[in-house]
Amino acid sequence: MLAVAAAVLAGCAAVEREPGPAVPPGEIRDGAPAGELDVARIVPVVPQPEPRSAYGNHSPYTVLGQTYTVKSSAQGYRQRGIASWYGTKFHGRLTSSGEPYDMYQMTAAHRTLPLPTYAEVRHLENGRSIIVRINDRGPFHPDRVIDLSWAAAVKLGIDQAGTGPVEVRAITFDEPDVPRVRPARFPVLLQVGAFAERERADGVAHALGNGGVAPVVTERARTGAGQIWRVQVGPLSDLDKTFELVERVIELGFDRPQYVYP
């Protein structure tokens, strides 16, 4: 499991949270607090519309050589996979959103949903269902879809096993039309995504081209985490054309592209 330390508030870095084969001398092992938790005392989460967090929504961001793009909306999100949890080692530390992690609250971490997002997590074997507020990034483990707080894990019934098969469904509210945002200046590029693998970048570029988006540029760049491939549209110098291509990118199923400047 991966915790997002204070330095990752801008989406730049993370500290690995996955349990390893051994814990080095002096390092704190993650786990549950002493004693049992009375689930009747867990405060339930009440979903409500909230503004985006000022931190943790930077996109794209790279962790352990893998680049992730934060979704522009949680609308319609539903995914099955493995849930895990994190506890005492990270209690009180800052989450990606800048809020302190409280293992006794019904919260969770997700790699790409906007922060915060409310979600229903349903255990596919025991039938239990909980609602959590996602305010952190993780888990950066390929076969896991969500990292639960310890309280949420207890409520769902995976605290003893450590993991469990779940379905995650985002809870969303009526979203107002997103106003058109003008670029700060021209020329401008529309960045559709950044990827650690050239093949994925080429696939996105190919899909954009087939969808009538042009010109598409695949650019290699180096970051502190290694080499990435950026897929960009442009450069563009006309406002109406820029707005038109932004909407076309979204129609093709991609998140709203970001403005970047050459």
Image (cartoon, rainbow, N blue to C red):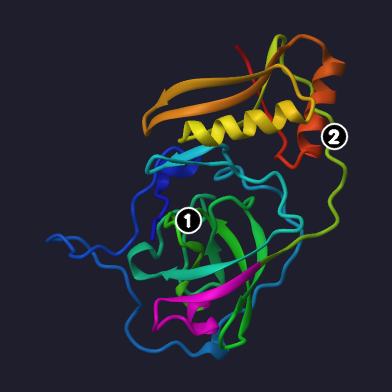
Question: Compared with residue 174, is residue 234 higher up or lower down, i.e. above or below?
Answer: above
Q: Earlier in the sequence, mark 2 or mark 1?
A: 1
User: For the point 33% across and 61% down, which residue is it?
Assistant: 18
Residue 216: which disc? none
Locate the N terminus by quadrant.
bottom left
Residue 138: which disc? 1
Question: Compared with residue 6, is residue 261 higher up or lower down, i.e. above or below?
Answer: above
Q: Position of residue 208 (x, y in %)?
A: 71, 30
User: For the point 34% across and 50% down, which residue is it?
Assistant: 15
Question: Compared with residue 208, is residue 166 higher up or lower down, i.e. above or below?
Answer: below
Q: Position of residue 57 (x, y in %)?
A: 59, 43
Q: Residues within 10 Å of mark 2 (few under 14, many from 20)?
A: few
Please indicate whether residue 164 sits to the left or right of residue 250 in the image. Answer: left
Q: Amino acid at mark 1?
A: Gly
Front residue of this view, candidates 107 and 18: 18
Secondary structure found at label 2: loop
Residue 179: which disc? 2
Front residue of this view, candidates 165 and 136: 165
Q: Position of residue 228 (x, y in %)?
A: 46, 29
Q: Give the mark toward the camera: 2 or 1.
A: 1
Q: Amino acid at mark 2?
A: Pro
User: Which residue is outermost to the left?
Assistant: 25
> Magenta part of the protein: which range?
152-168
Quarter-wise, where is residue 80 in the image? bottom right
Residue 155 lies in the magenta-colored region: yes
User: For the point 77% across and 37% down, which residue is it?
Assistant: 250
Label 2 to label 1: alpha-carbon separation:
30 Å
Residue 223 lies in the magenta-colored region: no
